Image (cartoon, rainbow, N blue to C red):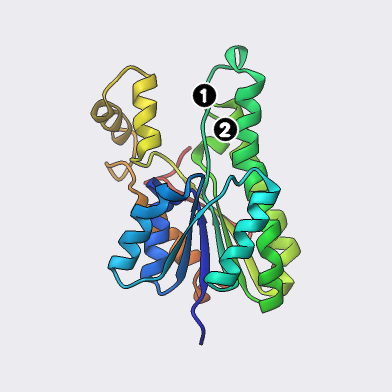
Amino acid sequence: MSQTTAIVTGAARGIGAGIAVRLAADGMAVAVLDLDEADCARTVKEIENASGRALAVGCDVSKADEVDAAVGRIAAELGEPAVLVNNAGITRDALLFKMTDEDWDAVMDVNLRGPFLMTRAVQKYMTGQKWGRIVNISSSSGLGNRGQANYSATKAGIEGFTKTLAKELGRFGITANAVAPHFIATDMTAAMAGKLKMSFGDLVEAYQKQIPVGRVGQPADVAHAVSFLVSEGAGFVSGQVIYVAGGPLC
């Protein structure tokens, strides 16, 4: 059996890097995709040092021409993709009355348009193979979060997008699911601490007091959930939102 090719967007660091490394450990060839190809080198090196196979790809997921070129290159150099993890995302947090048009549009373009463009480009390979796995990274912020009208809207939107993909593509042997993390220790959450004018350690401590398992999440926690959803054994799980949150959120 040929090696399965996976694409992980936003994989230069944080959750995306953790997912890419895990899928490589699961035996997949992984396209490590991010805005700057050079930034992907660390993730690629980690995979290759563990005897995995990876390809660094630079791409702005909000631009259709770049997405089509990147997916075509991946198919040619690594193999036709059968797994897609739409992880790339940005924040531009502000209260509604302070949020600019640019803040709104930038988050919409990366967080919602990006998964649409990537999935549209990849699905033809999956339908041709009659097998595929799509995992979209949502967030607990999809339930609503103060100061994140733009980000929350994209994450709620990605869940509706996911459920629609599950209905449209299921007959081709393709599943689509979303993983919605709560607080995960990454560069993005470290930047949140700066905006709140507190240390990252204090922010972590504040969150872990609210989380039933008594700790914040790590990229590996999300990667484990994705690993299951893209497996052969998860073929009857589709259209679902899996919260990786250390406990219930309500």
Residue extending farthest bottom: 1
Q: Residue at x 34, y 25 (%)?
A: 193
Location of residue 102 (image quadrant):
top right
Q: Nearer the viewer, residue 81 or 247?
A: 81
Q: Residue at x 28, y 66 (%)?
A: 49
> In the rendering, which numbered label is found on residue 244?
none
Amino acid identity at mark 1: Asp
Q: Nearer the viewer, residue 208 or 21?
A: 21
Q: Residues within 10 Å of mark 2 (few under 14, many from 20)?
A: many
Q: Are marks 1 and 2 in contact (CB under 8 Å)?
A: yes
Q: Residues within 10 Å of mark 1 (few under 14, many from 20)?
A: some
Q: For the residue labelled by badge 2, is the local secondary structure a helix, a strand or a loop?
A: helix
State the image coordinates of residue 43 (x, y, percent, origin top left): 36, 56
State the image coordinates of residue 93 (x, y, percent, origin top left): 51, 24
Q: Nearer the viewer, residue 6 or 147?
A: 6
Does residue 44 appear to the left or right of 114 in the view shown?
left
How many marks are shown on the rendered structure?
A: 2
| Whether residue 236 is visible | no
State the image coordinates of residue 77 (x, y, percent, origin top left): 54, 70
Task: Look at mark 2 in the image and give the residue it sits on.
Answer: 151
Is tag 1's residue or tag 2's residue first in the polypeptide sequence? Answer: 1
State the image coordinates of residue 157 (x, y, percent, origin top left): 66, 41
| Whether residue 96 is visible | yes
Q: Residue at x 59, y 41 (%)?
A: 111
Residue 24 to residue 190: above or below: below
Residue 183 to residue 76: above or below: above
Does residue 129 appear to the left or right of 140 in the view shown?
right
Residue 39 to residue 97: above or below: below
Task: Look at mark 1 in the image and give the residue it sits on.
Answer: 93
Q: For the residue labelled by badge 1, is the local secondary structure a helix, a strand or a loop?
A: loop
